[in-house]
Image (spheres, rainbow, N blue to C red):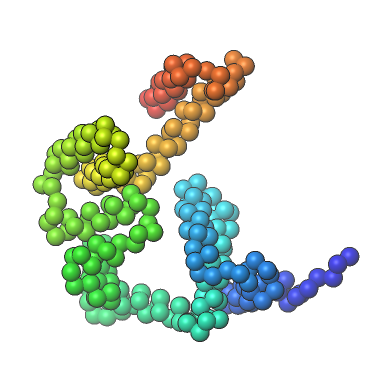
């Protein structure tokens, strides 16, 4: 039987402080002894941080508390890992990260930590944005637009950029203007497609998507959520096609488009009938 190493790290912590220290010690050990962990840097871990954050969101959407606990642990691991890398390079330590966050929360909640008041959610958000802009030294609207992170999902980033422009009046009077723009961009994409100019087609696809986001914003619809729902719907309906094909001893690739389309419409009608019950 192989003797277990580092028994002190196998002891389950009894307090949040002990648990946090245990995790930091585990990461510190891995950085010294694990070939993979030793090779990582901030850039190589970037995709891991994004994936873990999305997995947290997935657990929330699924209302799965056991999975949420696990995925939050994975995000925390990423935070500790990045901080460990920074500490090794003498950039900052975990104490700095936590203290900076506490101080930021205190600054951005003057209605709690000072004599200011904010009786509504809108006022709280307004104060938050004002303090945030001051912290980042944003004195122009261009700076505000550029500060929307490029790493955000493209639909979400587009929504936020449009919202910030709309805050200073750069916006349609109502949704009809957004619909007109959507039709215009559709026509321009069709024209670009006819030219076979790939750069132009790419640009027009982007313009069309941006216009769709604008319509969603006017309708108070989160475009990221809407597209996710549609992707889920597509998967369900395609699953019906595959299921029905299998009952006939077929696979989707053995069927014609017309046959699959007929089953797609069946799935659509069944969903609508179920929704009416």
Q: In the drawing, does residue 105 fall left or right of residue 163?
A: right
Q: Residue at x 18, y 65 (%)?
A: 141
Residue 255, image x, y percentages? 52, 18
- Residue 49 image position (x, y, % from top left): 50, 62
At x 51% / y 56%, what residue is drawn? 51
Residue 270, compared with residue 193, is above or below; it is above
Q: Quadrant of the C terminus?
A: top left
Question: Is 131 displayed left or right of 228 in the figure?
Answer: left
| Residue 205 visible here | no
- Image quadrant occupied by the N terminus: bottom right
Farthest residue toward the bottom? 90
Q: Is residue 94 above or below residue 190?
A: below
Give the quadrant of residue 21. Answer: bottom right
Out of 123 and 45, give the one closest to the viewer.
Answer: 45
Look at the image and tell me whether residue 253 can be seen.
Answer: yes
Q: Position of residue 89 (x, y in %)?
A: 52, 81
Q: Where is residue 174? Give x, y as percent.
A: 13, 44
């Amino acid at each position: 039987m192989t003797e277990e190493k580092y028994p002190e790290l196998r002891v389950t912590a009894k307090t949040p402080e002990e648990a946090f220290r245990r995790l930091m010690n585990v990461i510190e050990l891995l950085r010294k002894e694990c070939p993979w962990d030793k090779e990582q840097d901030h850039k190589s871990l970037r995709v891991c941080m994004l994936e873990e954050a999305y997995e947290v969101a997935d657990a929330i959407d699924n209302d799965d508390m056991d999975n949420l606990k696990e995925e939050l642990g994975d995000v925390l691991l990423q935070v500790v890992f990045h901080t460990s890398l920074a500490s090794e390079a003498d950039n900052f330590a975990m104490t700095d990260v936590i203290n900076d966050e506490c101080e930021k929360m205190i600054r951005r909640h003057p209605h709690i930590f000072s004599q200011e008041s904010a009786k509504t959610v809108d006022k709280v958000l307004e104060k938050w944005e004002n303090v945030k802009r001051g912290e980042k030294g944003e004195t122009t609207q261009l700076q505000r637009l550029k500060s929307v992170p490029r790493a955000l999902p493209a639909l979400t980033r587009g929504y936020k950029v449009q919202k910030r422009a709309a805050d200073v009046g750069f916006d349609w009077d109502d949704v009809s203007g957004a619909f007109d723009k959507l039709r215009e961009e559709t026509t321009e994409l069709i024209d670009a497609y006819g030219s076979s100019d790939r750069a132009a087609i790419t640009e027009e696809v982007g313009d069309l998507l941006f216009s769709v986001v604008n319509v969603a914003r006017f309708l108070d619809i989160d475009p990221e959520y809407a597209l996710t729902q549609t992707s889920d719907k597509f998967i369900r309906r395609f699953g019906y096609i595959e299921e029905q094909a299998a009952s006939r001893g077929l696979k989707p690739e053995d069927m014609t488009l017309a046959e699959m389309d007929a089953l797609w419409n069946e799935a659509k009608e069944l969903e609508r009938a179920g929704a009416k019950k």
